[in-house]
Amino acid sequence: MKLRNHTSIVTQLPEGVAPASFWSRVTQGIYQLLVAGIGLYLVYLLAMQMIYFRAPGQIESQRTLISAAHAGELVALDVVNNQLVEKGDRLLAIQSDKPCELLVDTRSGKLKEAIQLAQLDHQLIDNKVLFLRQRLNQQKVWRALELGGRRSINAHSLGEEISLAEQRLQGTNRQLKLQKKLLKDWQQQLAERQQECGPQWVVAPFSGSIAAVHLQQFEYASRAAPLVTLIASPAIVSIELQIDEQDSEHFSVGDLLTVELPNGQISDATVTRMISNAALAPERKQDNYRPVQTLTRVDLAPLTAGDGARWMEFDRADVTVITRR
Amino acid sequence: MSLSPPHQHHTIYFAIILMSWCCLTEAYAAQRHPPPGLPELASAASEQQNMWQLVTNLSNDFFNLYQVGDPVAADQLFTGNCDELTVPSATAAALKAEALAYTRDYGLSLNGVYSDSATSDGDEGSAYVELAWNLLDNGRRENLDRAKLLDQQAQLAQIQHQQQLFALSSRCVAERIGHTELGRYGALLRLHNQLLTPAEWLERRAYLNGISLLDELLDAQSQLAVTNIELRKLHNNPRLDTHLTSRETLPIMDIDIKKIIAAIRLDPRPDYERQLQRQSLTLTHETDREIKLRLYLRQQIPTDSQPADLVAGVRVSMPVGHKAGIAMPQRFTEINQKIEQQQWQRVARTLTAYDEFSEQLTRVTRQHYRLLRAAERLRQVIVARNLQADETDLATAATRLHSTLLAAENLITAKRTLYMRLNRVIRESQLVLAHQYLTPLEVPNLDYRARLGQRLLYIWSKNFNQKTNVTLIDLIRAKGMKQVVVSAGKQTNPVKLRRFIAIAENNQIQVELTLGDNRWIFPEQHEAAVSRSLNAANLSERLHLDVEPQALPDYKKNRVLYEQHYLQLVRRISGKLTGQRLTVAVPLHWRSQTYAELAPLVDELYVMAYEQKSSTQVVRRLQPLLAAVPVTKLRLLASAADFPSEWEMEQRFIAVAAQTGISRFGVHALNGMLQMAAGSK
């Protein structure tokens, strides 16, 4: 680029007019555009900074840690990492190291017999009530026909008989329920004892996938030791971000936000929860050092199932949450 | 023609007959020929079933027989003319003719005399012809008196003739009485015969099979024989045969003996008779005069001894001294005594006849109630059978039927005797208009159920569909109802409904079909409402409209408008009916004007007096209705659910009837009525 020099200390010649060049004008235009572009970009960046608020967050999928209810040897392990399981599937079995004694079933037979008798009794009384009602209806017609005779008894006595029978019916109902409950409790007790004395199987509380198996077969697990980490299917995934208190004004529950995933894709989210949180200050400072910072934790949920699936792909990854100020 | 009263004992024997029959086994049943009147039988069970069918059919025929009847008016019975007796008194006519003859006899006579006497001087004779006129004795005066006497004797003869006519008329009435209720009597005998014939056959079989004894068989045969004799008598006598198809019934009558006796005592005829006899006696005495007065004009016929001469003369003859003749005062006394004695005898005989009549009236009343009790017991067993109750016994049913028929026959006989004795009272009283002192005795008929007024019952779909038609009819009749309102809505079984209507009509029960939707009052619904109403009306000829605009939610705001819409609806329906009966259900709180406009459009208004605390309240609330609608168009409805017992409901009806004159009532509804009956202690 050639610059015009208006004055020259060497020559006194008239300045004249510099020769014009088309390409220099083009270049000039390009330079101007570039400068304008840069300027506009800076303005844009500034504007973005002023309009939008960005905060880092982390994708968290809900994981369930299954721990040992009691100490014992892991006698069976039927799952591996990333295995899909259904609710109720056996995961592993722990043999308790406590001594136990099996219960002898001395009551089931008698309880079942009592239940059968009670059911029979109930049926008989039910039939009797039905019969008495029919008889009462017949008796009403009989009396209305003014026929007299043996059938001309007062309906009150029939009504009382029906009432008594119904009370007995209710009684047998309650008795039946009680007996069934007793049987059930007894059988449950037997099963529990059986379980306690035998290897206790741990089953999947819900359908999902095995995120991690923490022990190996025949390994000893202490009480409350983590055994398996299970992620539900469909997984419950969320984004958690920690922001300063003063920034929390940009968020409110129910707001729709944009999330920038690590691969640059944009996803939609909504604020589900905002709670106060505290975090330890990572570094000491010379001035105004406070060891515990007061932050606000914001939980986001995916707006659609598709968003949730994409988030799952970046489990534990950092993302950027963008919201309008 | 009467059956003897000791037939009551036969009822016991009849019961034994049938109970012994019931001991027959199937083995016996297989050995026999079928009893007369029953079809070929396969087993004892089917024989029993057929016998049940026979008893049921005969019972239904009996009750149907008493559904129709034309009560005989007593005055027609006692005042109808007997042709043989409309003859005038011949004696009176003869006496009158003689009286007339005497009035034409002026006492003139033409006499002629010739006498010839032989004397010493030879024959001396005389002769004359004279025209004589007797004026007194044997003359004009006496003839006139005789004519008057004969006239009075003619009147006396007429009185005696009337008394004779009275006796003959009484005989004629007695014969007429004998013809009454022949139709019903004959029908009863036929029913009885249909029952006794198979019963006798069964008893004969039982006897020959050793189950019963000969005397029981003889009793059955005797009853059958008597029944057949009566039937033969009825059918063989040509004079009686013409009355067999009639349905006349004799009401039970009483007579006011006080008025009869008073009328006898005030009867002017004895005084008239007394007067006539006295006049007659007086005239007899007066005509028996001995004063003679005779005027004569004599022409002497010339003879040898006398010349011709015309002589006019007067002859007078008069008794001197006391004239023997009738002792008038004593005769008058005699006449008075006779008349008074006759009167006394008349009263005494009337009272005696009345005593016998009164005794018979007691018997008839007792017999009437005996018939009612027997019929009620028969009804109970037939209705129980209809309910297929196991405890109904064929022997009981047949015995009760037999008792009922016997009681009915005896009642007819007793009533005839009653009327005979009544006839005797009238005959002895010799009062021409004695029948006006007769009053019918208020006794209940076979439909009587001790309930006031006319009744109807509401039956809604659920109960209608659940209960058999026969049970429904039995229920209606048990409560003394003659009308029933049945829902014609979509939930009612249409086939059952048609059958029910037919059965009800056969039992003289009127069926009104009810339907309605409260929204029908709106003009846009009128067309559909009219169409549905006409369909129901064509089915039973009686339509009951159950449209209650007061049940609409905004009735209070639009009361006047809704009631006017309702009236328009009723007008349209009423205009489309072709003679069918239309009734409507109305509440107690509409405007008087609405009631007044509604009354001419319908046959009856059924007033829904539900949930009222007392009869006073009901009567008070009825006043606007009574002011706007004739009482004959009002029927009071009560809800059975409002009363703990039927007694309480009856007291309500009685109280309202006494204060308002309403005599038609209705019960809503069957379900409540059953509950009420069941709840009564």
Image: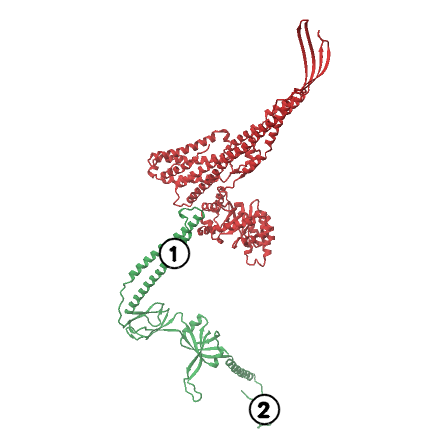
Considering only vertical position in the picture, is B60 above or below A211? above
Residue B1 locus on image (x, y percent)? 46, 32
Locate residue B414 relative to residue B327 in the image: left or right: left
Mark number for residue A6?
2
Locate residue A75 relative to residue A269 in the image: left or right: left
The shade of chain B is red
The shade of chain A is green
Considering only vertical position in the picture, is A290 above or below B521? below
| Of the pair A17 and B341, the residue shown nearer to us | B341
Residue A251 locus on image (x, y percent)? 48, 77
Q: Quadrant of residue A20?
A: bottom right
Mark number for residue A164?
1
Q: Residues within 10 Å of mark 1 (few under 14, many from 20)?
A: few
Residue B228 locus on image (x, y percent)? 43, 32
Chain that bears disc 2: A
Say if residue B32 shows up in the picture.
Answer: no
